[in-house]
Image: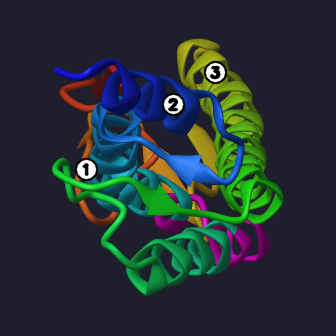
């Protein structure tokens, strides 16, 4: 490789307004990871009815995707350097990361609330009362001794595989 070409490649790699093929490999991996985890993250948000943070996450991921799709040559073309607006590039990636963190934090917070409520209900079940009233969703449930509850569509907040038995 002639020295002039090597020098130009070095300048392209260090240029803030250019995305060099050597930089693209890591960025492609990072983007593919975001897309691969999106359905699972959204499902977690849906499970706990978290909409604002989910919508913000989706909107920011869509903004990033649109920005990437508009780059020419394509941002994932490993043969060519792609001109970018570094400020926009950084802003889009940061916004997605922040929105994802906020959504996962909201999911974790809601999971704690549900776990604490579930623990309270299980403690009531173990207390020996003949009848325990609870609500795993918006519906009131009445539990009698001898009934068995498992994780189903009717009781989605019981941990997977957990059974609760009220002994007579």
- Residue at image x 73%, y 26%? 116
Between discs 1 and 3, the one toward the N terminus: 1
Q: Which image quarter: residue 88?
A: bottom right
State whether residue 137 is above or below residue 41. below
Give the label, 1 or 2, closer to the camera.
Answer: 2
Residue 109 located left or right of residue 6: right
Q: Quadrant of the N terminus?
A: top left
Q: Please tell me the numbered disc located at residue 119.
A: 3
Specify whether residue 51 is painted magenta. Answer: yes
Q: Nearer the viewer, residue 122 or 38?
A: 38
Q: Do the residues bearing badges 1 and 3 touch, measured as CB atoms within 8 Å?
A: no
Report crowding for label 1: few under 14, some 14 to 19, many 20 or more residues within 10 A (C-alpha): few
**How many dots with numbers?**
3
Q: Do the residues bearing badges 2 and 3 touch, measured as CB atoms within 8 Å?
A: no
x then y, percent, for residue 35: 32, 57
Report crowding for label 2: few under 14, some 14 to 19, many 20 or more residues within 10 A (C-alpha): some
Between discs 1 and 2, the one toward the N terminus: 2
Q: Which residues are magenta?
A: 46-56
Specify whether residue 52 is painted magenta. Answer: yes
In the picture of the structure, the residue carrying the numbered disc 2 is 13
x then y, percent, for residue 33: 32, 41
Between discs 2 and 3, the one toward the N terminus: 2
State whether residue 92 is above or below residue 33. below
Q: Main secondary structure of the magenta part?
A: helix
Give the label, 1 or 3, closer to the camera.
Answer: 1
- Residue 159 visible in the picture: no
Report crowding for label 3: few under 14, some 14 to 19, many 20 or more residues within 10 A (C-alpha): few
In the picture of the structure, the residue carrying the numbered disc 1 is 36
Element at badge 1?
A: helix
- Residue at image x 63%, y 36%? 111
């Amino acid at each position: 490789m002639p020295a002039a070409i090597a020098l130009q490649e070095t300048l392209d790699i260090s240029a803030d307004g250019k995305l060099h093929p050597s930089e693209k490999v890591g960025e492609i991996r990072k983007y593919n990871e975001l897309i691969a985890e999106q359905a699972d993250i959204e499902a977690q948000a849906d499970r706990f009815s978290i909409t604002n943070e989910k919508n913000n996450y989706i909107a920011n991921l869509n903004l990033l995707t649109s920005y990437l799709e508009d780059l020419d040559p394509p941002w994932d073309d490993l043969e060519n350097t792609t001109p970018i607006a570094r400020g926009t590039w950084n802003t889009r990636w940061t916004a997605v990361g922040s929105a994802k963190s906020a959504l996962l934090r909201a999911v974790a917070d809601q999971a704690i609330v549900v776990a604490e409520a579930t623990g309270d209900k299980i403690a009531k079940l173990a207390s020996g009362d003949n009848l325990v009233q609870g609500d795993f969703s918006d519906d009131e449930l009445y539990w009698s001794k001898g009934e068995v509850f498992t994780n189903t569509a009717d009781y989605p907040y019981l941990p997977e595989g957990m059974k609760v038995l009220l002994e007579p």
